[in-house]
Amino acid sequence: SRGGPSERSAVLQPTKNVHFRKLTTMAAWVIDKYGSNEVLEFREDNRRPSVCTSAEVLLKVHAAALNPVDVAMRGGYGSTLLGVRRDALSLGWMGGEFPLVLGRDASGVVVECGSGVTHFQPGDEVWAAIPPWKQGSLAEFVVLSESEVSHKPKSLSHTQAASIPYVASTVWSALVVTAGLNKDSCSGKRVLIVGASGGIGILAIQLMKVWGAHVTATCSRSAEGLVRSLGADHVVDYTSGDTKAQLETLEKFDVVLDNVGGDTEDWAVTLLRPWAGAKYITLVTPFLLNLDKLGLAEGTVQTGLTAGSKALKNLCDKGVHYRWAFFAPNGAALDQIADMVDEEQVRPVVEAEFSFSKVAQAFQKVEQGHARGKTVINIH
Ligand code: NDP
């Protein structure tokens, strides 16, 4: 009844294949074309990524988070430039970007390290912000460069940790790299954060307060309690009348971080101290849209002209610096943020949690706007 050799191999073979398949495949939410929420598809037979270069690490993802850029990328935003970056790096996109995995935040555990990796070993708990030209974290596994990864704060769960890396790296790029602020230069500086109640604002307020700046924040009335609890010194409700007029009654600012864009930049630059090195930094730029609409060459020229002429005009007319800022992966910055979290200077704000099977609902939540913190997906 136990069967002879031929019967045994017939029984064992499929078992082996199932095991092998489990090691080479993974579950992930993928898109095979751009569009609205119905393009999101859960599949269990995706190719599991592996470490290909000496500087890479393979992470098992425990939690991921969504950002507005995921909703935009689902619809094709940035595909012109990101496609070029993916091809140049040959990151497993064999002839096109699909199937594409979204998700820019990851908290998880290191499974495997390239031979040149020095900071991490299998079993380490880590967090990372994933560049948009790489496969994302709405998957069981993700491969990243060592420089993009950081040890996660010990005091946070994976769910809490996943809410921080992408917004923290972007805030670092905007306020530290572009505005030139740091722990020694912030004391006494007046910083205005326009659009303070979402993911970026939450991190920006906290970082500026840790470093001793005076923070004014704009948000709607329903977010005032949250924004004050994070440390904002002064809050302006943008829904209760003329925001510009309300802000004009205040002392002028040294730095404006604009997370809203559009008309905001026309008046926000006028709130800065003239001829004092003050900076207006916006995260809402037409850069990738220009490239999508006009193509790589014309889009780059158009973008350069727009940014350059605005910078020149604001410097000559108003005596203020006008700059665009962008997310940049930065494991070293995450190391510093992790210390601040473990010292209870910075805290996560998770507004909504979804299970891995409910990623489409999580996208709907983010797409509705009015964020009051981050939307996190628990994967394992
Ligand atoms: P979120 O969606 O998390 O938050 C946006 C917040 O702004 C919400 O709380 C919203 O609440 C509030 N808001 C909307 N309109 C206004 C307004 N007129 N004045 C004040 N607050 C307002 O987005 P993020 O914080 O993650 O990102 C902010 C922006 O930065 C987005 O446009 C994003 O695309 C961009 N970004 C750019 C990056 C880059 O590389 N350049 C990287 C990361 C983000 P409510 O509507 O209820 O007021």
Image (cartoon, grey):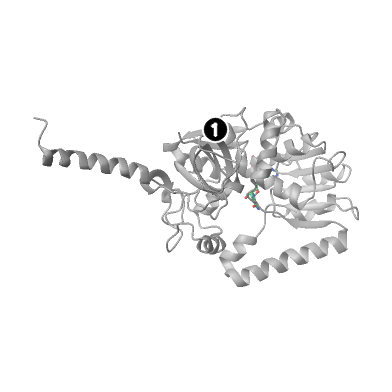
Residue flagged by tag 1: what amino acid is it? His
- State the image quarter where residue 207 is shown: top right
Q: x, y (%) of residue 349?
A: 63, 32
Q: Residue at x 16, y 42 (%)?
A: 10
For the N terminus, the quadrant is top left
Q: Is mark 1 within 8 Å of ligand 1?
A: no
Image height of 108 relative to 82, above or below? above
Answer few, some or many: residues within 10 Å of disc 1's Cα (few below 14, many 20 plus, some between 14 and 19): many
Which is nearer the eye, 112 or 271?
112
Q: How many marks?
A: 1
**For the view shown, which residue lies furthest in the front direction?**
115
> Left of 226 or right of it: where is 247?
right
Q: What residue does disc 1 label?
A: 158
Which is nearer the eye, 53 or 168?
53
Disc 1 is placed on an element classified as: helix
> Left of 275 or right of it: where is 64?
left
Q: x, y (%) of residue 255?
A: 81, 48
For the C terminus, the quadrant is top left
Q: x, y (%) of residue 241?
A: 76, 42
> Left of 97 or right of it: where is 274?
right
Q: x, y (%) of residue 210?
A: 77, 34
Which is nearer the eye, 244 or 84?
84
> Left of 101 or right of it: where is 21?
left
- Is residue 116 visible to the viewer in this orientation of the structure? yes
Q: Residue at x 66, y 41 (%)?
A: 334
